[in-house]
Structure formats: C-alpha cells, structure tokens
C-alpha cells in the first residue's frame, strides 16, 4: 500500500467518506454519490441493523458493497466481512471482479497486501482482516441455515438479496457483531442490494419506505441510475428508453416496485403481499381441510385448515409415511371439528390411498374435467336457446380452482391468520402464488395455466403450499358437498 492509501484510511476512520475516490472517470477522480453517502451514514448508526440499497440497475450497488468491505478491512485489523449471494458463481462474476478493480485502484496489491483463496472463497489481508464470499442458497437438508452457526462476522452484505430467502439473510445477519466490533466501536449491520422485486424486499423495504413507516432498525435508500455520475450510465439510460420496453424502463430506470411486469400473473403482487402477511379475523362459515400429500420425498406434506375462505392453520411436514399422513389429518379434523366430507386431498400419485382410510373425504384429481356450476348450467341453457353450443371454459379442475383462488385473493375474500407461517415459508408461498399464471391467454378454446413442470423449474421445487390451498375451491364448486352428513373418522 502507498501513502495515498494511508490517507484514504485516515479519512475513512474520520468518516469523511466524501473525500475518498472510488475510481476515475475520463481521468478525473470519481467519488461516492449522495445516495451512497447516505448508505454509509446508516452504516455508522448503531440503531440501523438492515440497510436496503438500490431499486434499479446501474445505481452503484456493487461499488458500495466493495467500498465498505475493503475500507473496513484495510482500516481495522482482524475484522471479517461476509459478502453473500444465492449463487456463489454469480457473485464471483459481479462483485469479486469489481472488488479486484477497486483493490488495484487503491494500490492494494495481490500477494503483497492480500491473498485470494479461490478454494475457500476468502480474501485474506496482511493485517488479519478477511472478506468471505458466502453461498446462501436454500438447501432442503439445511432449511434453517444452521451451517452459518460457526461464522463470526463484523458486518455483512447480500448482493441481489431479492433472490435469496428472507431467513437466509436474517440468519446471516445474526452472525454479525462477533468480530472486533467492540474493539473498534463498529456497528453491526447487513447491507442488502437489489432491483425492484415483489418478494420480501418489497414487504421489508419498499412498502415501509413508500408509506413513510420505516423503523429505526431498517432503512431503504432508493438509488437510481440517474444518481450515478458516470456519463456512460447516462448513455445506457437513453438506450433503455429508446428501446421502448416499458418493463425495462419502469424497473431498471425508474426503480418502480409497484409496476406489474407480468400480465399473465393471476394474483397481483400487492394482493399476494396482503394475503401472506395475514389478518386477524373472526370468520364465518363451515370448516374444511385441503391437503397436498407427499410421502418420504423432496416435496412437503401440506394440510390447510379453513373456516369459510379464511385459513386458520397450516401444517407442513417435510417427510412423512402413510400412517403419519392419516394421523395428522385426523388430529386436525378432530381439533377443528371437521367431518371427512369436508376434507379434500390430492388424489393424484401418493395421495391416492387416503380415500380408503378417510371415508367420504373428497378426492381432488387435478386433470379431471372442470365442474359445471349452476351458473354454467344457466348459461348453457341460454346459449342453447340461441343455437350456440356451450364452450368448455377451463382446461381442467385444477385450472378452474386456480382461477377461483385468484379471484378470492384479489378481492380479499380469501385471507389467512397472521403468524400461520414463519417468514421463510411466507416467502415461499408468495413465490408459489406469483407462479399461478395464464397460459395461451388468447386461446379461444378455453382458459389454461402454465404447466406444473414449468413452475417447478422456475421455483426449483414443487409448489406444495399453493397446491394445497387451491384445492379449497372444490367445496365452492360442489355446493352439494356441504350438505353431506357428518362422517366419523375411521381407519377401516
């Protein structure tokens, strides 16, 4: 390191960040933008535990992450930064490349001042400080992220945090404050950078900021590409705008979190957020159970307990055998006084055995024909009188129930008790509901939804919770089920 670097370190310790360059633009020093300086101010506030930054492309997110982590490490011996992303390979293609550029700019030389261990994914500085690059993708074998338990960090950052599960982020953040914070008086925090997204960053950062209800421990800085002084960014903005892609313009240039960029999505994102956060309610109506069955596999066994269209309880079991499935359904049925005639189960695949144990329960065959309702019958008679044949509206029963669920959630008729799901499962359900989408939108032969194989590919797993929830529709469509007599649970 050189004398200029020593000067930057002194300025950093004095918190005079505005005087520290982060590169050169056309031969002249470039400095942190006002939005980046605002983020640095939050980093110095011990009350702020989570900092959200960005909300658009080209807003200086990566440089902020690299600047904060590098300056901490060269200024204070033995501190440990954790920089994370859902996929480590993508972190290496973005953040680490910028990191090396910034290290070189500051005259911090590889092999002399630091070493990069590509196997352990760690930058080790000569003063004992380290930057750890961490993969925080969800693993079915570690759903609670216990693998982070042995990590001790000073501070951390999560790149594109909208891609990662909320529990992964909060668990990693809980590992900060353990490495030299008290020695140097450094506050602990988690810096999250992201583009507009309708997942947990929308709920945790954008909504509180938009509605002016931010808490002291969580702050959001909405940085736009227009905040970036680099002239090349201004050319990039002009290129995006001239392209005329409204989605790209709204999300990447304007940082619009509320822009709905998928017209095929049946349940709108604000309604999904309202639904998964839950509302306390004294619901009316009959009680029901809908269950998606999984036996000793990667899928979840999900049981949803309803009163009317309000979810009272959700039971999630990672793996189960046949007897455990029966026992759990019986237990909840007895607890909530639900007769078997108001219990629906996925009869495709593993769930096919249920009917032999729970007499009069309702099998749900996803690919079976849509149910012709009384309203459809009236329409059919009307069309026949006009000499027009009745058109089949839905591809199958599942499609019909998906459209019905979407209608109920969008109109706030379908609701859920708060705290029925832990945060990570709320996020998983939010992702699943966002994948309930039209297919062949303009096809005159009927209404379709995208295939489950496409959904599983997009999610990286099966949409078990939404599958269980959508089955509630069968009781709405088959009103005669509600009139069935009470049936005693039986093993026979």
Image (tube, helix red, strand yellow):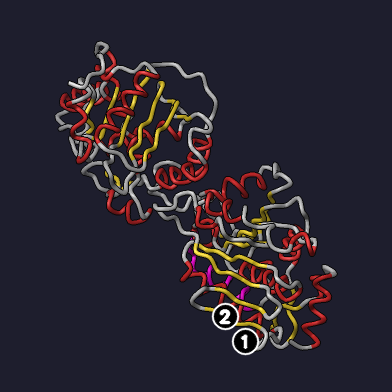
Magenta-drawn stretch, dominant element (helix, strand or loop): helix
Q: Secondary structure at mark 1?
A: loop
Q: Looking at the image, do the residues carrying marks 2 and 1 touch, with CB atoms under 8 Å apart?
A: yes
Q: Position of residue 170 (x, y in %)?
A: 58, 51
- Disc 2 to disc 1, how far (Cα)? 8 Å
**How crowded is the residue under tag 2: few (<14 C-alpha within 10 Å), some, or many (20+)?**
some
Residue 91's place in the image compared with 456, above or below, is below
Q: Horizontal placement of 467 versus 76: left or right?
A: left
Q: Position of residue 87 (x, y in %)?
A: 46, 65
Residues drawn in magenta: 232-246
How many numbered circles are shown? 2
Q: Horizontal placement of 106 versus 87: left or right?
A: right
**Residue for point 40% across, 53% down:** 141
Would residue 234 be visible to someone looking at this image? yes
The numbered dot on residue 110 is 1
Q: Position of residue 471 (x, y in %)?
A: 31, 32
**Residue for point 40% across, 25% down:** 306
Picture quadrant of residue 336: top left
Residue 33's place in the image compared with 199, above or below, is below
Identify residue for label 2. 116
Q: Quadrant of the N terminus?
A: bottom right
Would residue 441 be visible to someone looking at this image? no
**Residue for point 44% across, 46% down:** 428
Picture quadrant of residue 229: bottom right
Q: Position of residue 66 (x, y in %)?
A: 64, 72
């Amino acid at each position: 390191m050189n004398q200029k670097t020593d000067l930057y370190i002194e300025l950093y310790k004095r918190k005079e960040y505005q005087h520290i360059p982060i590169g050169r633009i056309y031969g002249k020093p470039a400095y942190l933008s006002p939005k980046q300086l605002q983020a640095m101010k939050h980093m110095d506030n011990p009350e702020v535990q989570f900092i959200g930054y960005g909300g658009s492309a080209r807003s200086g997110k990566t440089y902020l992450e690299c600047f904060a982590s590098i300056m901490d490490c060269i200024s204070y011996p033995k501190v440990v930064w954790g920089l994370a992303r859902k996929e480590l390979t993508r972190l290496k293609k973005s953040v680490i490349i910028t990191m090396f550029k910034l290290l070189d700019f500051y005259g911090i030389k590889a092999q002399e001042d630091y070493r990069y261990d590509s196997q352990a994914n760690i930058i080790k500085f000569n003063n004992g400080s380290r930057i750890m690059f961490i993969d925080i993708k969800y693993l079915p074998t570690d759903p609670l992220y216990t693998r982070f338990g042995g990590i001790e960090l000073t501070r951390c950052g999560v790149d594109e945090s909208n891609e990662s599960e909320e529990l992964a982020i909060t668990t990693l953040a809980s590992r900060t404050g353990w490495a030299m914070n008290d020695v140097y008086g450094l506050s602990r925090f988690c810096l999250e950078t992201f583009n507009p997204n309708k997942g947990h960053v929308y709920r945790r950062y954008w909504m509180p900021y938009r509605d002016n209800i931010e808490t002291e421990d969580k702050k959001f800085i909405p940085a736009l590409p227009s905040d970036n002084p680099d002239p090349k960014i201004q050319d990039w903005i002009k290129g995006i705008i001239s392209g005329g892609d409204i989605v790209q313009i709204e999300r990447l240039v304007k940082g619009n979190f509320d822009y709905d960029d998928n017209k095929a999505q049946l349940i709108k994102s604000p309604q999904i957020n309202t639904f998964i956060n839950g509302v306390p309610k004294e619901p009316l109506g009959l009680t029901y159970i809908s269950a998606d069955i999984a036996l000793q596999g990667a899928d979840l066994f999900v049981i949803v307990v309803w009163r009317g269209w309000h979810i009272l309880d959700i039971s999630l079991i990672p793996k189960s055998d046949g007897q455990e499935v029966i026992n759990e359904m019986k237990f909840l049925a007895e607890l909530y006084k639900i007769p078997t005639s108001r219990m629906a189960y996925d009869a495709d695949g593993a769930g096919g055995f249920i009917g032999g144990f729970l007499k009069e329960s309702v099998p749900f065959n996803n690919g079976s024909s849509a149910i012709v309702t009384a309203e459809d019958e009236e329409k059919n008679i009307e069309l026949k009188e006009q000499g027009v044949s009745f058109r089949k509206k839905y591809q199958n029963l599942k499609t019909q129930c998906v459209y019905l669920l979407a209608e109920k959630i969008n109109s706030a008729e379908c609701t859920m008790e708060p705290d029925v799901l832990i945060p990570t499962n709320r996020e998983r359900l939010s992702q699943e509901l966002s994948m309930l989408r039209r297919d062949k939108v303009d096809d005159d032969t009927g209404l379709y939804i995208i295939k489950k194989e496409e959904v599983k590919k997009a999610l990286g797993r099966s949409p078990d919770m939404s599958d269980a929830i959508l089955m509630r529709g069968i009781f709405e469509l088959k009103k005669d089920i509600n009139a069935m007599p009470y049936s005693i649970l039986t093993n026979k």
